[in-house]
Image (cartoon, rainbow, N blue to C red):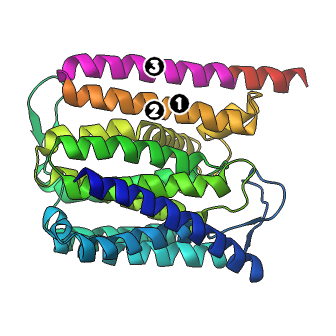
Amino acid sequence: MLNIFIIALISAFAITYFSSHAVIYLVGKYSIFDMPGERKIHTHPVLTLGGLSFIFTFYIMIIGGLIIYPQFAGQILLHNLTALIVSQILIVGLGIYDDLRGLSAGIKFTIQLGASVILIYFLGFSINIITNPFGGEIHLGIFSVPITILWLVGITNAINLLDGLDGLAAGIVLISSLFLSFVSLYLGQNGVALLFIILASSLLAFLKFNFYKARIFMGDTGSMFLGFTIAVLSLLISMKTTVSLSLMVPIISLGIPIMDTSVSFFRRLLKKDNPFRGDKLHIHHILLQSGLSHHHVVILVWVITLLFNIIALCFMLIPGRYSLLILLIFACMVATGIMFLEFIKREKISIK
């Protein structure tokens, strides 16, 4: 099995590396750029649709895996892959159209909702139980399907909204995918672990072109694909294992995008703004405005994500109450640090 993982890791890296060159050539030839705007950081046009490189790799690796390693289909179940791919097609199509022509938040939300419903229908699976960190389990009952849809749509948009700096979203998903592959292996989900490894290795190659200063952006095509895929794979981890255990791990693993999106959503509601409309008050914007450089902000958020993932592993390996305490302390430290940087930013503005 180790040989399969090594081959997948190397192959995914190589395919993404060379396909990124091909995508850069094609989008450059047809002049497909992400233009500067009011809510964007970059000040000059940058090539977009870069996400097509790791999306291409993901599907090529699945096809290759089914041919070369037939046990792969049994480990993850063919109908699970079918459900994933069918729903992903909607997400990828949505992203491509949005990158080329632009779409309203309402239309994007509706299509994401449709993709989530299709996935749940195909899988015949939803989140039925979640962990009570203080012991026992919470049965969701009639709220099972709505909460599953909230998870899928929420994580899709969380990663999409964090794709505001060069390499930020790619690095966050890379780190989480790597750790969630370990979780999958620990829980006996070798097929899901393989998909996480493919995703992580692809993003490592893509960062060669996407880190500061980026030659190409992944676009909404890439960020929504990543968000939706990591949300679905997190559900697949739990399909043959204890949902209450395995679901809390990806929630903690994706702590930064979840916290950032939740805070942004409720902040806009309190201000009576459209909660689905983007702004420049996300965590990376606050860190930038505090005086940190572009690449320092990205690396800092990567480090915080890494720490969240270490805590996620602690949650799985040690009693829930102790790991929850560690998580709460760390989350409070992160929140305090962000508020301190927000204070520094306001002081700078008042001095000016």
Task: Compute the Cα span from label 2 to label 1.
Answer: 5 Å
Residue corresponding to mark 3 = 332
**Relative depth, front residue between 26 and 9:** 9
**Residue placed under numbered mark 2 in the picture:** 306
Q: What element carries label 1?
A: helix
User: Which label's residue is closer to the chain start, 2 or 3?
Assistant: 2
**Marks 3 and 1, the one that precedes in the sequence:** 1
Residue at 41% over, 37% down? 255
> Is residue 260 rendered to the left or right of residue 342?
left
Q: Over which residues does the magenta segment extend? A: 318-342
Q: Residue furthest right?
A: 352
Q: Estimate the spatial distance between the alpha carbons at disc 3 and disc 1, rounded to whole Å.
A: 16 Å
The image position of residue 49, as x and y in percent, is 62, 70
Check disc 3 and give the amino acid type. Cys
User: Dot 1 corresponds to which residue?
Assistant: 303
Mark 2 Cα within 10 Å, few/some/many (few <14, many 20+)? some
Image position, residue 55 (x, y; %): 47, 69
- Confirm whether residue 231 shows in the render: no
Instruction: State the SS at label 3.
Output: helix
Above or below, 256 against 9 in this view is above
Residue closer to the observer: 310 or 101: 310
For mark 3, does the 10 Å Cα neighbourhood hold few (<14), some (14 to 19), or many (20 or more) residues?
Answer: few
Q: Which residue is drawn at 44% across and 52% down?
A: 200
* Quadrant of image for the N terminus: bottom left
Instruction: Inspect the image, locate mark 1, and give the three-letter code of the amino acid beneath it.
Output: Val
- Report the side of 225 relative to 69 (left or right): right
